[in-house]
Image (cartoon, rainbow, N blue to C red):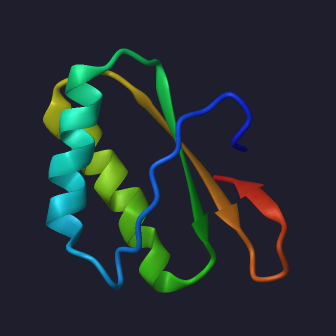
Amino acid sequence: LLKGKKVVIGCPKLDDLDFYIQKLTAIIRENSFNSITVAFMEVPCCNGIVYAAEQAVKASGKNIKVNKIQITIDGKREQL
């Protein structure tokens, strides 16, 4: 998942989700890339990071694909 990529880490349960959306929106607006990959754990609160990424792309006004990879409780990866 990480080779050759830039990484941003966050926890939507413990941190301010609106801050994440604003920060990600700024990163997307100021940089050029074709997609974002969001890796998140298979627990309900981690879906918030997917939401933040999707909202940031929308707010940026750019057409960027959001790839979603869920890490299951037993450590497997599932492309959604």
Q: Residue at x 42, y 58 (%)?
A: 50
Q: Residue at x 78, y 60 (%)?
A: 77
Query: Horizontal placement of 73 versus 46: left or right?
Result: right
In this orientation, does residue 27 appear? yes
In this orientation, does residue 62 appear? no
Q: Is residue 56 above or below residue 5?
A: below
The image position of residue 6, as x and y in percent, is 53, 36
Of all residues, the one furthest to the top in this rendering is: 32
Q: Residue at x 15, y 38 (%)?
A: 59
Query: Horizontal placement of 47 versus 62: left or right?
Result: right
Q: Who is closer to the viewer here, 21 or 62? A: 21
The image position of residue 78, as x and y in percent, is 75, 58
Q: Is residue 36 above or below residue 79?
A: above
Q: Residue at x 33, y 47 (%)?
A: 54
The image position of residue 26, as x and y in percent, is 18, 36
Q: Quadrant of residue 14?
A: bottom left
The image position of residue 70, as x and y in percent, is 65, 63
Query: Horizontal placement of 24 versus 79: left or right?
Result: left
